[in-house]
Amino acid sequence: MLELKNIKKSYKTGDFVQHALKGINIKFRKNEFVSILGPSGSGKTTLLNIIGGLDRYDSGDLIINNKSTKKFKDINWDFYRNNCVGFIFQSYNLISHISVIDNVIMSTTLSGYKRSKRKKLALDALTKVGLKEHAHKRPNQLSGGQMQRVAIARALVNNPDIILADEPTGALDSKTSKQIMDLIKEISKDKLVIMVTHNPELANTYSNRIIEFKDGEVVNDTNPYEEIDKNDKLTIKKTKMSYMSAISLSFNNLKTKFGRTFITSFASSIGIIGIALILALSNGFKIKIDEFEKDTLSQAPILISESTIDLTNVTNTHDEYTEYSSDKVIHPLKINVTSEHKNNIDSNYLNYIESIDKNLVGGIQYTMISKINMYTKVNDKVKEIDTNSIMSSIPSSMDNDISSIMRDNFDVIEGTFTNDPYALYILVDSKNRINEEILKTLGYDNTNISFEDIMDKEFKVVLNDTLYSKIGANYIPNTNLEELYNNESNITLKIKGIIRGKKDNDFATLSGTGILYNQSLISTIIDKNNESSIVKEQINSDFNILTKVPFDKENINTEKNMMLTMLGAYKVPAAISIYPKDFDSKDEILKYLDKYNKDKKDADKIIYMDQAKMITSLSGGIMDAITIVLIAFSSISLIVSSIMVGIITYTSVLERTKEIGILRAIGARKKDITRVFNAETLIIGLFSGILGIIIANILIVPINNIIYELSKLEGVANLNPIHAIILIIISMTLTLIGGFIPAKIASKKDPVIALRTE
Ligand code: ADP
Ligand code: MG
């Protein structure tokens, strides 16, 4: 089953060629105890390594199972080593950072068995060598003889057909040597044992065949084997290391070097901490900016008024002058008349506005300039109220409910918001104050007023048919205020609530104080006034219905509308303010407004003003830029740390050279070695990623405290869990890349040299 045919092997060191084996021919029986005897340097170890598939012969052939191994690939040698051969070394070659039983279990790493089965096999092997009780000790807690027994158990655990022992008693005293030899003798009963020794006495006592070596040649063979039995065959299975084995091997290694692993992980987590904090901050600031934008947007609605300045025209004038010139000359600025644009807000356009997607709009405010004839009682005397100076409308929402602008920005501190078109509200400032002039108008003299006193205060709207009586061909306004006030057809308005801006709300603060009415009130009054006979007659006349002066022919529509406004019957608002719900909604609304102008003549276009535009585009952009710069800086530290992990992995490779040799000796593939080290870097990457996230989260607490002290913004820094997971994955990827080259180096290590290093 095993035959060496003219095997030659030489080593080159510089120009010097050492012929370690000079043409060896040996046939082995399936079951014998062979001693290879010879002086140091005669090539015994080299022979054993070649038989064991650890080293490659230069020429000749090694016949296994009647087949040449000339065409063997690495993988075939790996399978052969793992299945057929068990190595025992002079220096035991145990891995010191794992327990005795784990050393034995490691040999079964490639068996493909479950861990429980592998553990049982290892315990059986340890029992066989009499070390069952010492299974959980570390190798360095054992004596030399005991360590060699562990090595024997490790060689036996896969039940190989061949045991190769290289001076197994070389480091032991004679008494212990004898015990070990007895054990090996026992093993040789059903295996081929090839033992290298330079002790003729041991060879004579225990083996049944002695092959003597000298200068790389066989000089004597006491029991040569001539006829090979073709039926003696070795069994060779395919084996490989599972990822779990690789991970547990690396994990155990890292555990023994906890201090170093921790410091490495900590150092490489610094980049992660940096990026995590930057993301947390920029994330938080973005949210705050969004909130700020929403505030800004609600303060600065899209404004559509009857006349507006077409900014595009203004900036385009005066092409002959250069911008930001250093010339010390002042030019006259001619305001281009055409830059003023008349917006023709008609019912068509109003319908278009009413059809805006409800979800985009927080509220729409129409500024009506139609006169309202309003009266109230002050100290039992009726008094006319100038509505334009003390009242303003609440922005309505699309569905006639109180708009979200109101709910978002104001608290109702007395009464309720209602849809009742005849409800009025008192708007006070943060100190519950209201403009003194308004109070005077309402008849309260510079004193404090209880809510109770002002709630339900009544106002009367007198309609045109009550105010104007037609006498002959003329309309005469009634001047008896008492009579007007008490007319049955009047509309009665009542103060139904007191509202105050929410705390620290800019929009509310800017809104001032006064009396608010629901928008539906104005349209209701205008509708009613349109029914009045004076308005009907005015609509059909080319002259002022009150003075009988004819309208200017050129300007008939404008003059008539002014008259209708005076009569509280002009339906078209002077301005429309649209409050977008948020930044994106605003874009949509602007698109919608632009669509109206498409294919229209310049004169028919409706031009709007977007006041919030400048501020918002600025803030978002700056934040993004700062974030990118900071992340770039932290990325550098992340890359530095992965290079560091690479260096540390490389050190680990150097340190574990022996372990690599042992793993290869038991049949581990190059790939398996790479896996062990990749598993190690992955564990470090995972650990440093998690550590980084934990530390970042701890640091967020004081950072938020500082930000709060500086800006009164609460909980700004806030790490998104998805970002955290991505960062851990990045950390693992980078350390894996950093350790990739060292892991490759490890897998390329020559197992023979690896085992020879101490
Ligand atoms: P033995 O085990 O009988 O003491 P070895 O097989 O270890 O002898 O070595 C045989 C010869 O080959 C020695 O001269 C040794 O110096 C040389 N040799 C072994 N391995 C190497 C190597 N990797 N590089 C160079 N020379 C080597
Ligand atoms: Mg040797």
Image (spheres, helix red, strand yellow):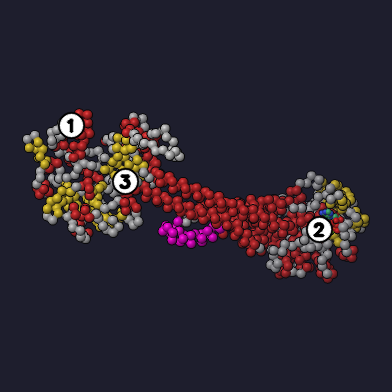
Q: Can residue 403 be seen in the rendering of this structure? A: yes
Residue 135 visible in image: no
Residues shaded magenta: 692-716
Which label number is shown at residue 551? 1
Report the front residue among 362 and 285. 285
Location of the C terminus (image quadrant): bottom right
Q: Do the residues labelled 2 and 1 touch (CB within 8 Å)?
A: no
Pointer 2: residues within 10 angstroms few (<14), some, or many (20+)? many
Spatial CA distance of label 3 from label 2 is: 90 Å
Which residue sits furthest front? Answer: 328
Reading the image, the residue beneath label 3 is: 363
Sooner in the amino-acid sequence: mark 1 or mark 3 = 3
**Residue 266 place in picture, x, y as percent:** 59, 60
Which quadrant would residue 265 be assigned to in this image? bottom right
Mark 3 against mark 2, which lies toward the viewer? 3
Dot 1: element:
loop
Frontmost residue, 337 versus 311: 337
Residue 164 shows which numbered tag?
2
Q: Which residue is drawn at 21% across and 41% down?
A: 370
